[in-house]
Image (cartoon, helix red, strand yellow):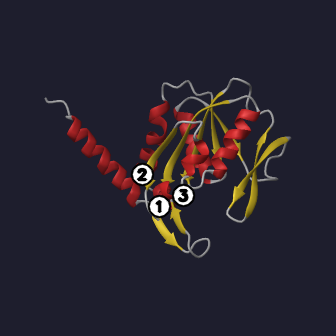
Amino acid sequence: MRSPTDKSIARDAQVKLTKLRDLIIDVPGFPSAGIVFKDITPLLADPAGLSLAVEYLTQPFRSSKVDLVVGAESRGFIFAAAVARNLSAGFVPVRKPGKLPRETRSEEYALEYGVDRMEIHVDAIQPGHRVLLVDDLLATGGTAAACCRLVESLGGEIIACAFLVELAFLNGRNSLTKYPVHSILIVEED
């Protein structure tokens, strides 16, 4: 029996990425005019698609000795918890203001018209913890950068940031230049 060639492996990977891309539906004008929302709910409902997405988010970090996986509210929770399980790591949620029940630390980040804030429990991360940030989407990078600052303010070390979808035309990587960024699906144009 012949082993697969580099070409056949690349072709198989491209077929899988196309399957993932096809499970995400563009919704023009949501939540407001001019925005094209990436609806991942069909991907989440597809067992093979969900499994593949989680595996692609996990694979590059299997030997990275991750202690904790941080997920940003809300769709990041879905993927971060699954990746944490795959890496035998813990999961830490980073939430919008007022959603965590105990003492928190917060970090503001810029929006197109104003600011927002993310919060984490003050005891969620210990100094020296190796942390992987996972979210569904990288757009401008504001949320991810705020999450990274929160982790570091508690003494954690961000080893990388991983995303299902990256909207490259919004230049979110520019907010994360200190960290390796792994994106499964990269959208070059709006």
Label 3 crowd bin: few (<14), some (14–19), many (20+), radius 10 Å = some
- State the image coordinates of residue 60 (x, y, percent, origin top left): 45, 33
Q: Is residue 88 above or below residue 114?
A: above
Give the amino acid at mark 3: Leu
Number of the label disc, if any, that sits on residue 126: none
Q: Secondary structure at mark 3?
A: helix
The front one of 1 and 37 is: 37
Question: Where on the picture, by quarter, is residue 160?
Answer: top right
| Residue located 62% across and 47% down the image | 77
Residue contact at pointers 1 and 2, CB within 8 angstroms: yes
Label 1 crowd bin: few (<14), some (14–19), many (20+), radius 10 Å = some
- State the image coordinates of residue 29 (x, y, percent, origin top left): 55, 75
Mark sitting earlier along the chain (3/1): 1
Q: Secondary structure at mark 1?
A: helix
Give the amino acid at mark 1: Pro
Number of the label disc, if any, that sits on residue 42: 1
Discs 3/2, front: 3
Q: Is residue 149 above or below residue 23?
A: above
How far apart marks 1 and 2 lie (CA) works out to 9 Å
Label 2 crowd bin: few (<14), some (14–19), many (20+), radius 10 Å = many
Mark sitting earlier along the chain (1/2): 1
- State the image coordinates of residue 99 (x, y, percent, origin top left): 79, 52
Question: Residue lying farthest left?
Answer: 1
Question: Residue lying farthest right?
Answer: 103
Q: Is residue 98 left or right of residue 88?
A: right
Q: Secondary structure at mark 2?
A: helix
Q: Is residue 172 above or below residue 91?
A: below
Number of the label disc, if any, that sits on residue 49: 2
| Residue located 58% across and 28% down the image | 66
Mark sitting earlier along the chain (3/2): 2
Q: Which residue is mark 3?
A: 170
